Amino acid sequence: MSELHYRLLNGLDWPSVQALCAQEGGDHWSQPQWASSLSGDWVMGAFAGNSLVAVLVLQSGYLQAEVLNLLVDPQWRRRGIAQALLEQARCQAQLWQAEKLLLELRYSNHAALNLYLKSGWRLDGRRRDYYPRLEGQGREDAWLMSLPLAGQAE
Ligand SMILES: CC(C)(COP(=O)(O)OP(=O)(O)OC[C@H]1O[C@@H](n2cnc3c(N)ncnc32)[C@H](O)[C@@H]1OP(=O)(O)O)[C@@H](O)C(=O)NCCC(=O)NCCS
């Protein structure tokens, strides 16, 4: 994707993150959640010119790392940007010497499920009633997924 460039984000990028989140329907983090990640986590952004078009948040833990958030501007989807960000996250987790990557996603999020399966992730389980539903009352399940990292023990 030659027209894009990637760089790590920090607190100064909050207005760009806010603008990107505004493109998406409602499943956003709060400003305090973003402030915490922009100051403490590995947050990679994809830019088209000066516009932030995608972001991935990766958090380091003991022998593992977790993808906490991944969002691509609706106008930039299906161009391989999420896959490119996941590959960068995988490389960063290996630098941290993590043995695996983890994440959870909504049971109804078929686009993300396809993305992760295509990127080599596996389904580890399902957590009942984990998320409040985006529409209507009640809760929905989460998929738990992981990606073992090459060269590391499972
Ligand atoms: C899920 C999301 C991150 C995918 O971003 P993207 O940049 O469009 O994904 P990619 O172009 O890298 O897609 C790679 C593969 O994922 C799968 N995929 C992506 N979007 C899909 C969709 N809408 N429907 C079905 N499969 C999809 C496909 O297998 C795709 O490969 P293909 O285009 O060759 O068929 C994006 O739709 C998004 O931001 N959604 C809202 C936020 C979200 O759900 N984040 C994930 C939370 S865990």
Image (cartoon, rainbow, N blue to C red):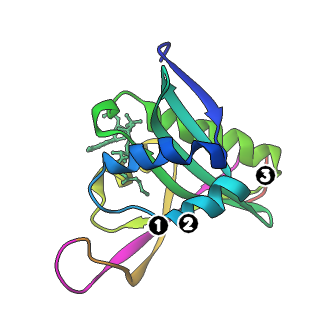
Q: Position of residue 133 (x, y in %)?
A: 27, 76
For image coordinates 64% across by 53% down, the residue present is 38
> What residue is disc 2 on?
33
Residue type of the residue flagged with mark 3: Gln
Q: How many marks?
A: 3
Q: Looking at the magenta stretch, what is its main secondary structure? A: strand
How far is disc 2 from disc 1 in space, using C-alphas? 5 Å
Residue type of the residue flagged with mark 2: Gln
- Residue 27 vs 95, above or below: the answer is below
Q: Earlier in the sequence, mark 1 or mark 3?
A: 1
> Label 2 neighbourhood size at 10 Å, few (<14), some (14-19), many (20+)?
few
Decide: marks 2, 1 in contact (CB < 8 A)?
A: yes
Q: What is the number of the mark on residue 152?
A: 3
Of the two numbered discs 1 and 3 in the rendering, the one whose residue sits closer to the viewer = 1
* Secondary structure category for the residue under label 1: loop
> What residue is disc 1 on?
30
Q: Which residues are magenta?
A: 135-149
Of the two numbered discs 2 and 3 in the rendering, the one whose residue sits closer to the viewer = 2
One can see residue 41 in this view:
no
Q: Is residue 124 left or right of residue 61?
A: left
Q: What is the number of the mark on residue 96?
A: none
Q: Is residue 137 left or right of residue 114?
A: left
Specify whether residue 25 is painted magenta. Answer: no
